[in-house]
Image (cartoon, rainbow, N blue to C red):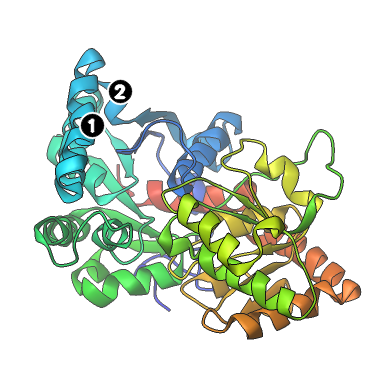
């Protein structure tokens, strides 16, 4: 697969720098721009915080030494007290029209981010703005002083951000706000200087509806996380664990159905769920209806979840729409075999029968069979656990991936600068 037109790819289709690329990179400021808060629990937060932490750790002379300083800019970087009434109005709009609330949220956060970018870009020369969404990319394109200030967009979204808002039930499909978001992406993606896709699937999903983006230099570079060793290894915590916001697209309902199907076979397998979201009450009610409420612990959001992961036997995942999955990577980092659906990019993260198992997302009884087959074969589970750890160490560590990301993000600059 030709990912960039100029950038080579390895046998897995990921971007790999050519020989000498890193030493040719110029020293320029890197600006990470996002419409999100500086801290949070989303995969996007993990992506840019891990990158910034890597840059802070990396000494000059390595790939990260090509960055002459890194700055995070968000809507909270400008505005002071003005942010409270501007951002707070969304909650009032949500009661009248969730779609109007989404539109106000996007407009307000872009406006404040533009102000922060304007102040920064007017005081700097050459730089690269690494935008974390199309809205932040548009803000950077509008505020940059010229082509010497590059804009590279990370494609974290599934197909389009319009689809993600629609999946949450906040924006009607093909409604005015939905179409507006699509129009923004149609205008912005072909204009940026580079595109970073976090999976081959994400690239295909975008190009299927926006083929004009194929003309932009691009690379597929996996997400990544820094290996984490708990200060005190946990004791056994349970059989299964899953991590993710409690939203419809994450498909936690299906996990409950699989537990019920396993219970029908006489096996009462326990599941710990980490995450919060609008589906929690409905999920708890559904667990009661299925007779598995005593098998599920709703742990909410916990900052120490990575400390706790090694205490489980399997990581289970039922989401049916992702651009990638940091949760799966973190589970593999903890040495957990993965059981997930054959959907989207998930098969790019692990191989069926090696680091875990694929299960159907439309047949809970069959899925229970896959699950119990691995749980009941301890030698196979241990082999998968070791393979998962090795796969993570090879493909998804910050040390392995972040330099490749920087090679591409900084490499879109003209070489004759």
- Residue farthest left in this picture: 176
Where is mark 1, residue-wise?
A: 113
Are circles 2 and 1 on residues that touch, CB within 8 Å? yes
**Left or right: where does residue 148 sit relative to residue 52?**
left
**Snapshot quadrant of residue 157:** bottom left
Give SS at disc 1.
helix
- Horizontal and vertical percent position of residue 41: 49, 41
Quarter in which the N terminus is drawn: bottom left
**Left or right: where does residue 260 sit relative to residue 203?**
right
In the image, is residue 173 above or below residue 79?
Answer: below
Quarter in which the C terminus is drawn: top left
**Snapshot quadrant of residue 160:** bottom left
Give SS at disc 2.
helix
- Numbered tag placed on residue 396 in the rendering: none
- Horizontal and vertical percent position of residue 359: 62, 79
> What residue do we see at 84% from left, 71% from top?
383
- Horizontal and vertical percent position of residue 191: 17, 56
> What residue do we see at 54% from left, 70% from top?
254
- Disc 2 to disc 1, C-alpha distance: 7 Å
In the image, is residue 365 above or below residue 137?
Answer: below
Q: Residues within 10 Å of mark 1 (few under 14, many from 20)?
A: many
In the image, is residue 135 above or below residue 184?
Answer: above
> What residue do we see at 38% from left, 30% from top?
72
Where is mark 2, residue-wise?
A: 77
**Left or right: where does residue 284 sit relative to residue 241?**
left
């Amino acid at each position: 697969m030709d990912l960039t037109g100029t950038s080579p790819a390895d046998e897995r289709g990921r971007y790999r720098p050519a020989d000498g690329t890193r030493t040719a990179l110029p020293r320029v400021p890197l600006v990470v721009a996002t419409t999100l808060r500086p801290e949070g629990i989303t995969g996007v937060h993990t992506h840019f915080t891990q990158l910034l932490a890597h840059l802070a750790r990396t000494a000059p002379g390595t790939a990260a030494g090509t960055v002459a300083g890194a700055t995070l800019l968000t809507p909270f970087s400008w505005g002071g007290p003005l942010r409270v009434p501007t951002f707070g109005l969304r909650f009032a709009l949500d009661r009248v029209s969730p779609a109007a609330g989404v539109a106000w949220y996007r407009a307000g956060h872009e406006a404040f981010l533009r102000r922060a970018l304007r102040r920064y870009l007017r005081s700097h020369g050459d730089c690269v703005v690494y935008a974390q969404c199309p809205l932040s990319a548009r803000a950077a394109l509008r505020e940059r002083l010229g082509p010497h200030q590059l804009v590279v967009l990370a494609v974290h979204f599934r197909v389009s951000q319009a689809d993600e808002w629609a999946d949450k039930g906040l924006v009607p499909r093909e409604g005015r706000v939905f179409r507006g978001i699509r129009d923004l992406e149609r205008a912005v993606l072909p204009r940026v200087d580079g595109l970073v896709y976090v999976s081959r699937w994400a690239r295909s999903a975008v190009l299927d509806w926006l083929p004009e983006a194929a003309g932009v230099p691009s690379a597929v570079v996996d997400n990544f996380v820094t290996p984490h060793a708990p200060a005190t290894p946990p004791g056994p915590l349970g059989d299964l664990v899953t991590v993710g916001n409690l939203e419809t697209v994450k498909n936690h309902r299906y996990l409950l159905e699989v537990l019920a199907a396993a219970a029908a076979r006489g096996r009462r397998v326990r599941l710990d769920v980490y995450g919060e979201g609008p589906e929690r009450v409905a999920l708890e009610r559904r667990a009661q209806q299925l007779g598995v409420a005593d098998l599920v612990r709703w742990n909410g959001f916990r900052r120490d979840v990575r400390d706790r992961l090694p205490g489980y036997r399997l990581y289970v995942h039922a989401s049916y729409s992702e651009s990638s999955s940091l949760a799966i990577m973190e589970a593999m980092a903890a040495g957990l075999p993965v059981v997930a659906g054959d959907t989207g990019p998930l098969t790019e993260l692990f191989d069926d029968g090696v680091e875990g198992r694929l299960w159907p997302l439309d047949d809970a009884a069959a899925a229970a069979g896959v699950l119990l087959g691995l749980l009941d074969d301890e030698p196979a589970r241990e082999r998968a656990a070791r393979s998962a750890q090795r796969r993570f160490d090879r493909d998804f560590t910050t040390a392995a991936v972040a330099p490749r990301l920087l090679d591409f993000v900084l490499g879109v600059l003209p070489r004759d600068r």
